[in-house]
Amino acid sequence: MAINARARITLRAMEQFVAVAEELHFHRAAERLNMSQPPLTSAIRKLESDINAALINRGNRVLGLTPAGKKFLYESRETLRRAEQAITATADVAAGRTGVVRLGYVGSSLYGRLPDVIREFRTNHPQVRLELHEATTAAQVAALRDGRLDVGVLIPPLANAEDVDQTLFDSDRLCMAIPKDHLLGKRPGLILSDLSDEPFILWPMVEGRGFHLQVIRLCANAGFVPEVTQEAYGMHAVLSLVAVGAGVSVVPESMSGFRGDRISYHPLSSAEPEFDLVLGYRHLSPAAQAFVRSA
């Protein structure tokens, strides 16, 4: 027997049938559904007509289910369960409770408040997968534009990035990094001009324009132009080269615990070495919105 081609079996009809099938009594099923019995009886008869199959064995009271009724009970329960899952999953995505957040960050941010933010977000949003990608500011901006990242922890100013929204995230300051066994490392009251004759290790300006220019400006104010003998992509790479004696550098003070056995760190005076870190983003998913709010 074919189903009525115009029939549309609704979730409500399935709920009504499940209530009758489980109670095996129209009156109790009607009370469970908060409706009167006659409309429920009519709804079940219409359902049988739409399906073109008897679902219930009737007597003076509901006696049981036909084989077709037992099958439809199983399928109805599964359909209602899947519908509830679909609603819940959709609501979770819309509220940012599930999904994926692809987070980029400059290496120095791991030594600030970023680890605590990540820990708190993972605790409060356990169903959101947080993917972490260390990259330079320039690489992150490119990844935000082509959709490979959702949010980035960046060092401003950002070159030609008017399409990237920015929110203040953290602050840091610069300090001098010198190989531990270097004679300058033992000089009391070391100042930046003392490094004027030393080979410098920096990162390419195209990868972190704001950071690079700030170091160059600090050196210029100290009366010299640094001789950059080697460039490295990322702060960990810069400091690793300092650790093996390849030169000196100016780095975020928050990283002064990195390779402390091989590097000595020296503060820079005044407020000029201070700098900010920002959250950068363009088109935020609900999960990414939740991360930005948390951060």
Image (cartoon, rainbow, N blue to C red):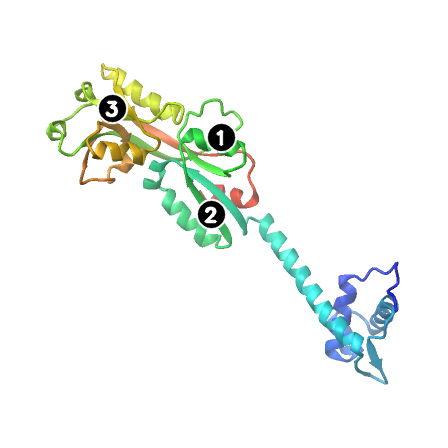
Left or right of 56? Residue 125 is left
Q: Quadrant of residue 153?
A: top left
Relative to residue 63, is residue 132 depicted above or below? above
- Label 1: element kind: helix
Say if residue 43 shows up in the picture. Answer: yes
Mark earlier in primary sequence (3, 1) = 1
**Disc marking residue 195:** none
How far across and how far down the image is residue 240, in percent?
26, 35
Within 10 angstroms of label 1, few (less than 14), some, or many (20 or more) residues?
A: few
Q: Amino acid at mark 2?
A: Leu
Outermost residue toward the top? 223
Within 10 angstroms of label 2, few (less than 14), some, or many (20 or more) residues?
A: some
* Labels 2 and 1 touching (C-beta < 8 A): no
- Quick one: 87 or 249, which is closer to the camera? 249
Left or right of 76? Residue 38 is right
Q: Quadrant of the N terminus?
A: bottom right
What residue did someone put label 1 on? 142
Mark earlier in primary sequence (2, 1) = 2
Q: Amino acid at mark 1?
A: Ala
Q: Quadrant of residue 235?
A: top left
Residue at 39 percent across and 30 percent down: it is 155
Residue at 37 percent across and 31 percent down: it is 276
How far across and how far down the image is residue 260, in percent?
20, 40
Label 2, label 3: how far apart the Cα atoms are: 36 Å
- Label 3: element kind: strand
Q: Nearer the viewer, mark 2 or mark 3?
A: 3
Q: Nearer the viewer, mark 2 or mark 1?
A: 1
What residue did someone put label 2 on? 130
Q: Amino acid at mark 3?
A: Phe
Label 3, label 1: how far apart the Cα atoms are: 27 Å
**Disc marking residue 200:** 3
